[in-house]
Amino acid sequence: MSVSFAISEQDYVKSAQLNGELTKKTKIAHLVIDTLLVLAGISSLLNGNIVLGSAFIGAAIGAVTLPFLLKTVVVPFLLKRHYKKYRQMQKPMSVELTADGLSFKTETGSAILNWPDIYAWRENSEYIIIYIAPKIYHVLPVRIGENGFPVSELKNVLLSNVGVAT
C-alpha cells in the first residue's frame, strides 16, 4: 500500500540532527579526550603552571560547549533556512514497501530503492533514515504508520537485508 506524506520543516531539522548524531565510538572518544584535557589542566594547575592549566581546562570547556551550541542553535537555524529554499522537499511524496525495496513517488518522478543498494539505516522514535551512501539518505517519518505504512515490517526487512541500525 502506497502512503503519502510530506517532510515538514521540523521533520527536516530533526532528521538531519539524527543523521548528525555521533556514534557510540565517537561519543566515547570525545569523552576520553575531554577527560584527558581536564586531567592535564588539573595536573598543570597543581604543578603551578596556571596558564597551561587554564588553557587545558578552557579547551575542555570549549570541546563540550561548541558542539552543543552548534547542534542546538547554529545547525537548526541553517537547516530551517535551507528547507525554505528547498521547494522539492516540501512537496508531497509517497512510499510503498515492496518485495524488492522501497518505491518512492513524487509529482516529478519515481524511484525504486532496492534492498542491496541500501548502505545503512538509522532510527529513533520519530524517523527512519535510509542511507544510499554515507551522507545521502531518505527520511521516513514514523508517523506514516498511522496511515497504513508497515513501519515494523520495514524495520524487520532492513534488519535482515542491511543489518543493525547504526
Image (spheres, rainbow, N blue to C red):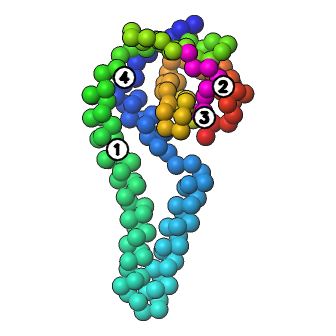
Residues at marks 1 and 2, CA–CA distance in whole angstroms = 32 Å
Query: Could you tell which of marks 4 and 1 lies nearer the N-terminus?
Result: 1
Closer to the eye: label 2 or 4? 2
The reply to whether the C-beta atoms of the residues labelled 2 and 3 are less than 8 Å apart is no
Q: Mark 4 points at which residue?
A: 89
Residue 115 colored in magenta in the image: yes
The amino acid type found where label 3 is placed reads Ala
> In this orientation, does residue 150 appear?
no
Residues at marks 2 and 3, CA–CA distance in whole angstroms = 10 Å
Residues at marks 2 and 4, CA–CA distance in whole angstroms = 25 Å
The reply to whether the C-beta atoms of the residues labelled 4 and 1 are less than 8 Å apart is no
The reply to whether the C-beta atoms of the residues labelled 2 and 4 are less than 8 Å apart is no
Closer to us: 76 or 112: 112
**Residue farthest bottom in this picture:** 48
**Residue farthest right in this picture:** 160
Closer to the eye: label 2 or 3? 2
Label 4 packing within 10 angstroms: few (<14), some (14-19), many (20+)? some
Residues at marks 4 and 3, CA–CA distance in whole angstroms = 21 Å
Q: Mark 3 points at which residue?
A: 120
